[in-house]
Image (cartoon, helix red, strand yellow):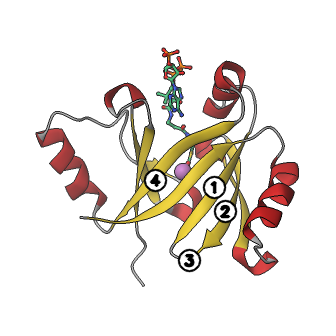
């Protein structure tokens, strides 16, 4: 089951600069913000927690990052939405049954959570991430 919109991600050139803007927009305190490097995805990321969801700001780590390519082709802006589930494998099986296949096998995202992406060409030109909830 998809239980929540975990985050909405925005590709940015300069994480600190964009974070300052989004702190003003959201009135977030430092306690709501977490910054992390995710080498497996070649990104540096800032999460701003807002209720049950987050805004994820993505800065590329190096030229091979998918965010580098995105910024070159499309500039800064909305990059993906992430849908949360308690059972990633079950959700992948469910979509595969409907002929909707992920881009690749699940990998490690921010906070060590398992994530998987669907190609925007199959999902209304919007990149969609599934992210597995860590059980409390
Ligand atoms: C922080 C870790 C993790 C988390 O825990 O939340 C993350 O969020 S990591 C985020 C970064 N990682 C990824 O984005 C991985 C998944 N992405 C990919 O596999 C690729 O970027 C892609 C989506 C398959 C595109 O790669 P590629 O085909 O090589 O790029 P092109 O530049 O050739 O684009 C083809 C086509 O797709 C359009 N496109 C690209 N990115 C997006 C996007 N984010 N949203 C919508 N559309 C996108 C691009 O414009 C091209 O379209 P056309 O020009 O019309 O052909
Ligand atoms: Co994400």
* Residue beneath the point at 66% across and 32% down: 65
Dots 2, 3 in contact, CB < 8 A: no
Question: CA–CA distance between discs 2 and 4?
Answer: 13 Å
Question: CA–CA distance between discs 1 and 3?
Answer: 14 Å
Q: Secondary structure at mark 2?
A: strand
Q: Which residue is mark 1?
A: 56
Dots 2, 1 in contact, CB < 8 A: yes
Q: Dot 1: few (<14), some (14–19), or many (≥20) neighbours within 10 Å?
A: many
* Residue beneath the point at 41% across and 30% down: 120
On whether ligand 2 comes within 8 Å of the CB at mark 1, the answer is yes
Question: CA–CA distance between discs 2 and 1?
Answer: 5 Å
> Quick one: label 2 or label 1, which is nearer the N terminus?
2
> Quick one: label 1 or label 3, which is nearer the N terminus?
3
For this orientation, the residue located farthest to the bottom is 136
Dots 1, 4 in contact, CB < 8 A: yes
* Image mark for residue 47: 2
* Residue beneath the point at 63% across and 71% down: 49
Q: Which residue is mark 4?
A: 82
Q: Secondary structure at mark 1?
A: strand
Q: For the residues carrying marks 4 and 3, which lies nearer the camera in this image? A: 3
Q: Dot 4: few (<14), some (14–19), or many (≥20) neighbours within 10 Å?
A: many
Residue 15, image x, y percentages: 81, 49
Question: CA–CA distance between discs 4 and 3?
Answer: 15 Å
> Quick one: label 4 or label 3, which is nearer the N terminus?
3
Residue 3, image x, y percentages: 32, 68
Dots 2, 4 in contact, CB < 8 A: no
> Quick one: label 2 or label 4, which is nearer the N terminus?
2
């Amino acid at each position: 089951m998809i239980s929540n919109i975990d985050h909405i991600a925005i590709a940015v050139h300069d994480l600190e600069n964009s974070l300052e803007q989004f702190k003003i927009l959201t009135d977030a305190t430092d306690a709501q913000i977490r910054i992390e490097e995710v080498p497996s995805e070649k990104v540096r990321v800032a999460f701003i927690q807002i209720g049950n969801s987050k805004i994820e700001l993505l800065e590329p780590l190096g030229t091979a990052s998918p965010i580098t390519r995105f910024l070159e082709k499309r500039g800064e802006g909305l990059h993906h939405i992430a849908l949360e589930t308690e059972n990633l494998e079950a959700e992948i099986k469910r979509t595969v049954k409907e002929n909707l296949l992920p881009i690749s096998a699940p990998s490690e995202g921010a906070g060590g959570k398992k994530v998987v992406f669907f190609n925007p060409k199959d999902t209304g030109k919007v990149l969609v991430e599934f992210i597995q909830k860590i059980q409390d």
